[in-house]
Image (spheres, helix red, strand yellow):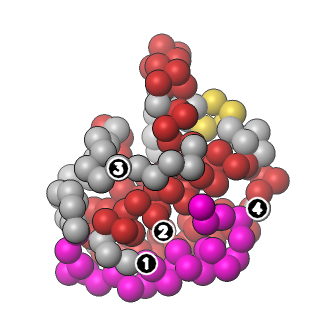
Amino acid sequence: MQNVFLKEDCDQFVNRINHLKSDTQPLWGKMSVDQMLAHCNVTYEMVYDDIHKKPNAFMRFLLKSFVKDKVVDETPYPINIRTAPQFIINGNRNFELERQRLIAYINKTLELGKDNFEGKESLSFGKLSSKEWNNMFAKHLDHHFSQFGV
């Protein structure tokens, strides 16, 4: 598993992003490349931007009980895995804007570093270790970059 807190690994993620073109086609799934970039940005928006609503207590209980372990462990996502509603991107997005935003979020996470994420609370799963944060970020990026062949 790559490490979002190591510069070399972040450089690899950025390099993969930079190999995408606005007309890159997915190997599976329904998202366009611009939608995929916007979709990947949602994970970071939930950390850095106050634009997503925190699930209610019952939903958080369900997410922590049945979803969290699958999201924060090191097991890769299967292809065509279902997407949570807040991650569904409808309509076209600006490819270049979404690409730049994702690179900025990756760099911001690197700059803040591992210690900043130790015990940091996630909107959906409560407090996570820096390893869980890393797994969540890295595995999600790898899944979607692989989806688009980069």
Question: Is 57 inside the magenta-drawn segment?
Answer: no
Q: Which mark is residue 102?
A: 2
Measured as percent of width and height from the top left, residue 24 is found at 23, 79
Label 1 or label 4, whichever comes before in sequence order: 1
**Label ID, residue 17:** 1
Location of the N terminus by quadrant is bottom right
Three-letter amino acid code of the residue under disc 2: Leu
Q: CB atoms at circles 2 and 4 under 8 Å apart?
A: no
Residue 113 place in picture, x, y as percent? 76, 62
Number of numbered discs visible in the structure rendering: 4
User: In front here: 53 or 110?
Assistant: 110
Q: Distance between the residues labelled 4 and 3?
A: 28 Å
Nearest-to-viewer mark from 4 and 3: 3
Which badge, 1 or 2, comes first in the chain's sequence? Answer: 1
Query: Based on the displayed image, in which of its 4 quarters is residue 94 positioned?
Result: bottom left
Residue at the extreme right: 115
* Above-or-below relation of 74 to 142: above
Of callouts 2 and 4, which one flags the residue occurring earlier in the amino acid sequence? 2
Q: Earlier in the sequence, mark 2 or mark 3?
A: 3
Q: Secondary structure beneath disc 3? A: loop
Q: Residues within 10 Å of mark 1 (few under 14, many from 20)?
A: some
What kind of residue is marked 3? Pro
Magenta-colored span: 1-26
Of tags 1 and 2, the one toward the viewer is 1
Mark 3 highlights which residue? 78
